[in-house]
Amino acid sequence: MTTVVGVSQVNYYIKSLLDYDIVLSDLAVRGEVSNFKAHDSGHLYFSLRDENASLRCVCFKGDARGLGFLPKNGDAVEAAGRISAYEKTGEYQLYVNAVTLTGRGGLHDDFERVKGRLLAEGLFEAERKRPVPRYCLSVAVVTAPAGAVIHDIINVISRRNRFIRVTLAPARVQGEGAAEDVARALREVNEWGGADCVIVGRGGGSNEDLSAFNEEIVARSIAASKIPVISAVGHETDFTIADMAADLRAPTPSAAAEIAAFPEADFSAFVRRQAARARAAVERRISGCSEETDGLWARVARVPGDAVKKRREALFFALKRAEAAAFHRIELEKAKVRAFAAVAEANSPQRALSRGYALIRGERGAVLRAEELHAGDAVSVELKGGKAEARIISVSRNSDSINEFNAKS
């Protein structure tokens, strides 16, 4: 008959098994230090890792005082202690009482070797980095489709600008084959060519979790991208080789979305300023060309008779060339004005309303997602030509709307 027990009983039993195991009660584990953190309490937290696995470790304040040195990420060490479990979470770890430094770890050496080689090639030079466009209307995101990163980016961009298109290029970002997958997704985004910038990243994790972004193949794919790349790997304190190769590093994926998404109001003001400048330039050109042509005609009129016919003809042709050049410059400025006006019109909320869409506003402002609505909510519905007040009867929530790009499909 199956025994039914509580979670606490299971964790206590597992801890007892570990505590009374002769081998696990006194051993030294060889590995490379990663994710080291010295807590304000005096306790030390870190992991030991090798090529295939990692082990969580803790060294309490009393034992930490006797170490004689502070381990750091990349150190190859032998840590002595006992294996036990933390009952509250059921996680087992090495409780360290002594650490012996044996050198630098192989994984750290691999990191430094790749970094040094790419640095020598000039892959990280500021001169080769491309500026991220100030006004991106299409943003591609290389990340895991099921992770929180893509949803965070969509939420931030949607809040700042509803007209920016977000396209997902799905890739594994952790584990075997992740580096190759990220490089493939970057290559496919460039072959597609429809993005103004690319965000490459993942959420936080251990050094092992982020290791794909320290691979040479990822760094070279970022450097080879024709589209500017924003790296957003882990938390603000994490730093990878991908960050060094990228055109711009963001401390978090949400920060990358803030960089890529310009506010709607900013763009509208920019278009108005540029259109005004273009109009002023046209007026200045017309005025300048008018003065120039008037001066040439006056010079032509002053040239006497047949004796200086060639001089008169030369001035006449100069006049015609000046008029043609002036006309050409004016047409260019007019084209700029029309282009700015077209962009402003395309991104105008009223344009969307004229196509049958509606803008819904709740108590907190514009409603972008179904999750923001609940039965009974009072909303204002803005349509072409007017507004209507409404109350939500029920909400049907579908899966999140994400444009997923896959060049192979």
Image (tube, helix red, strand yellow):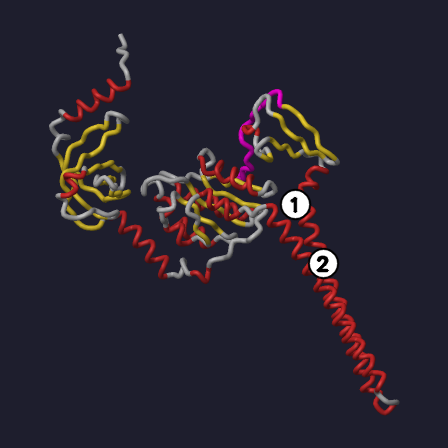
Where 391 falls versus 325 (above or below)?
A: above
Q: Amino acid at mark 2?
A: Ala
Q: Residue at the spot x=58%, y=23% of the render? A: 396
Q: Position of residue 317 (x, y in %)?
A: 80, 78
Q: Residue at the spot x=43%, y=60% of the render? A: 126
Secondary element type, mark 1: loop
As drawn, the label of residue 347 is: 1
Q: Is residue 176 visible?
A: no
Quadrant location, the N terminus: top left
Where 391 falls versus 54 (above or below)?
A: above
- On the rendered structure, is 137 left or right of 48? right
Within 10 Å of disc 1 (Cα), the crowding (few <14, some 14-19, many 20+) is: some
- On the rendered structure, is 115 left or right of 307? left
Q: Amino acid at mark 1?
A: Asn
Q: Position of residue 391 (x, y in %)?
A: 64, 23
In primary-sequence order, the first of circles 2 and 1 is: 2
- On the rendered structure, is 57 left or right of 313? left
Magenta stretch bounds: 392-409
Q: Position of residue 265 (x, y in %)?
A: 61, 47
Which residue corresponds to mark 2? Answer: 335
